[in-house]
Image: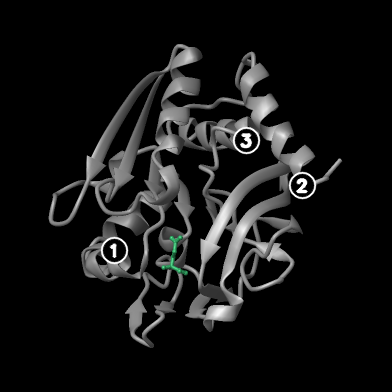
Amino acid sequence: MELKILWMYHDLMDLYGDKGNIETLRYRASKRGINVVVDTCTLQEERNIEDYDIFFLGGGADKEQTLIYKDLLARKESILKAKESGTAFLLICGGYQLFGQYYLDQDGKKIDGLSIYDYYTESSDRDHRCIGNIIVEAKIGEKQVTVVGFENHGGQTKAVSNPFGKVIVGHGNTYKGGYEGYMDAKTIATYMHGPLLPKNPAIADEVILRGLNRRYVVEHLEALQDTLENAAHDAMLKRLNVK
Ligand code: GLN
């Protein structure tokens, strides 16, 4: 089997080591004997997004979001085609925001989003910035998964129809908001850097499965020895006093 991953704006949208997510996808899929192809795509570069099994867009500060949003909007048709073809989307922070209606930045400037989802994001005042370690309970298939990460965003995301999970520690979509991210059958969108996937192997495997199922029928992946991954995950739970 082959897994084609598109890493969007790799040179601009890569806050707090979001690229670790790509390394994790590559490593975990390769371990299962899957042939992994990772292509990058930056401003003005031509790519058929619908040719990819996984679309990854990391986070970025207001400056980078301003730099990329027009280029991203110009790719809307290709993104919609990809969605239709069953591509799995993983969107982090600034990338998550840009799939909604808009992001109103710190300076009050409106950055249009793709409007693929109904949610929208508006910057908070400085006292309500959401910063720190975060723990979220997410339901992946029938399983309840505890997800650990780090958040740092001024944006408050509202009107989220279907959150990624419930916040146990931290803020999430809004300051002390209780819910985090957005999820549907093909998209996981979250404020969790950390980066997300190295410490949360269950989420990494979910993204790989979703991606593989665009072209193949795969019900589950063979288990890997996740001693280090689980130790990193559990160390965060312990540090934040979560059982
Ligand atoms: N600029 C956005 C915000 O502050 C996104 C930041 C990020 O990607 N960490 O809300």
Residue underneath mark 2: 240
Write the residue at 30% across / 31% down. 38
Write the residue at 40% across / 67% down. 98
Q: Position of residue 175 (x, y in %)?
A: 65, 73
Amino acid beneath label 3: Asn
Write the residue at 56% across / 25% down. 218
16 left or right of 46 in image: right
Mark number, residue 79: none
Q: Position of residue 41 (x, y in %)?
A: 22, 46
2 or 190, which is in the foreground? 190
- Tell whether label 3 touches label 2 (CB within 8 Å): no
Crowd band around label 2 with a 10 angstrom C-alpha radius: few (<14), some (14–19), many (20+): some
Q: CA distance from mark 2 to mark 3?
A: 16 Å
Crowd band around label 1 with a 10 angstrom C-alpha radius: few (<14), some (14–19), many (20+): some
Q: Which of disc 1 and disc 3 is earlier in sequence? A: 1
Amino acid beneath label 1: Glu
Amino acid beneath label 2: Leu
Quarter location, residue 69: bottom left
> Can the viewer see residue 39 in this picture?
yes
Mark number, residue 200: 3
Q: Position of residue 172 (x, y in %)?
A: 64, 63
Seen as rendered, the residue at the extreme right is 243
Q: Nearer the viewer, mark 2 or mark 3?
A: 2
Residue underneath mark 1: 64
> Can the viewer see residue 142 in this picture?
no
Label 1 residue near ligand 1, CB within 8 Å: yes
Count of residue discs: 3
> On screen, 157 above or below 12?
below
Q: CA distance from mark 2 to mark 1?
A: 31 Å
Q: Which image quadrant shows ligand 1?
A: bottom left
